[in-house]
Image (spheres, grey):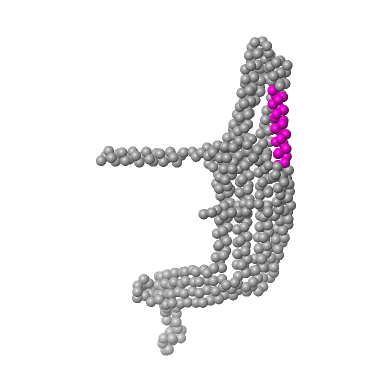
Amino acid sequence: MRKTIFLLICVLGSLNTSKAQDSTEVQSYALSLQEAITYGLENSYDAKNAYTDVEIALKQKWEIIAQGLPQISGEVTYQNQFIQPTSFIPAVVFDPSADPGDFIPVQFSQKQNASAVATWNQLIFDGSYIVGVQSAKTLLQISENAKVKTDLEVKQAIIEAYGNVLLAQESVAILQKNIETVNKNLNDTQKIFENGLGEEEDVEQLQITALNLESQLNSTVRQLAIAYDMLKLTLGIPIDSKLVVTDALEDLTMQYYDLNLLARDINPEKNIDYRIAEDQANLAETEVKLEKSKALPTLSAYVNYGAAGASNSFTFLSDEQRYFEQSILGVSLSVPIFSSGMRAARTAQKELAYKQSLEDLERARNQVKLEIASARNDYQFALDNFATQEKNLDLAERIENKNSIKFFEGIASSFELSEAQTQLYQAQQDYLQAMYEVIANKAALEKVLDTSVYKPKED
């Protein structure tokens, strides 16, 4: 029996250990850019908070609507008068011959009493309620448009963060290749110098180049780690998890090389920033209506029903306890008559605020036009610059190759080779940066041209 218990404890212990190991296991992700966008729109911190804001707005809308629906409340009261109140009645009430100045102490109520009342309240007419329902719809629209804007910003941030990872990866690969080439040249030059056919300066110049490349590589490796962490943070993935990007920078650049996008145009009123400004104007207009509605009368009604009982001892749960019913039907009409100009002043303030919102709306319209033109210009420049840097890289590679041949043939100096190598390394980085700019600027242009509307999640 003891052996059986011991074996059972060991099995349970091993299961708990395996569960603990599973719980501490680091999650791994391998995502293409499109997969990263899909994941981020569902799981990023900003996207989830924006969705929660929409849910809050939906609850607020129902809260406002419910104010005009029947309201039922109940109240139960129990009182125990430890010291009962005493009243004094003139003695002549009970004894006509008593002295008029004499009073008899009397306790009218019983020591304990209990009551229960249920009340039904119903709003019949309230101008503020009607406007409030309209404002609830506007507030919901604001939160939905804010969700759309957040999603567009999250998408752009994911594309930029993903591109930064690819840029750092390609930079690491190119630096490693450059170091390999320079080290080979350094070894060959070292042998030439040792055989007395070269100068020590040639060796030292290549050593400087190799050290600089090593330093750049170490820095870029650290930048790659930071870029990965930034992408994880943007996606809503824990920083300590493993993430691998599956797209290549060059392939992604070709996907984002789209001349047709430059010809695409939209009505500025469909831009999300304009729609948000329009929401604010609509809300300001609703606030004007709300202030005006406060000059209208308010009509409400109520019905209550209750029962009360009293006793000198606690007998309220007994079948013999008597309860006396009561019920009231009431109607209340409140009519604003005179406010010394306070309502007029408040209405005037809201009208001025509404006027300001219309000015903001017009500014938003022109600002959207400017953003579209600026984003289109940036994307056009990115495409042109990419083509230019591609040609520059080809020329830099040819120049470096020629100088390398001349150097080992003794025609060019180590300084000339170093200059050609520096020019090549800069051209490589410019080419990588140009590819990244194509991706990033297309994402920015797509953002201002996007006409998305909020789509609720399906249950």
User: Please, which residue is most extreme toward the top here?
Assistant: 196
Screen quadrant of the N terminus: top left
> Residue 228 at x, y = what percent?
58, 37
Q: Residue at x 70, y 29 (%)?
A: 394
- Residue 172 image-quadrant placement: top right
> Residue 87 at x, y = what percent?
44, 78
Give the vertical position of 80 relative to 195 (above or below): below
- In the rendered view, does 110 fall on the left or right side of 158? left
For the stretch drawn in magenta, what is the main secondary structure? Answer: helix
| Residue 394 colored in magenta in the image | yes
Give the vertical position of 56 relative to 94 (above or below): above
- In the rendered view, does 441 fall on the left or right side of 54? right
The reply to whether residue 114 is in sight is yes
> Residue 405 at x, y = what percent?
69, 19
- Residue 174 image-quadrant placement: top right
- In the rendered view, does 232 fall on the left or right side of 277? left
- Residue 145 image-quadrant placement: bottom right
User: Please, which residue is most extreme toward the bottom here?
Assistant: 97
The reply to whether residue 146 is in sight is no
Which of the pair 426/347 is nearer the observer?
426
| Residue 447 colored in magenta in the image | no
Give the vertical position of 199 relative to 366 (above or below): above
> Residue 459 at x, y = what percent?
51, 54
- In the rendered view, does 388 fall on the left or right side of 229? right
Q: Residue at x 44, y 40 (%)?
A: 22
Give the vertical position of 217 relative to 191 (above or below): below
The boundaries of the magenta stretch are 379-401
Q: Residue at x 63, y 38 (%)?
A: 252
Which of the pair 298/80 is nearer the observer?
298
User: Please, which residue is most extreme toward the left here?
Assistant: 1
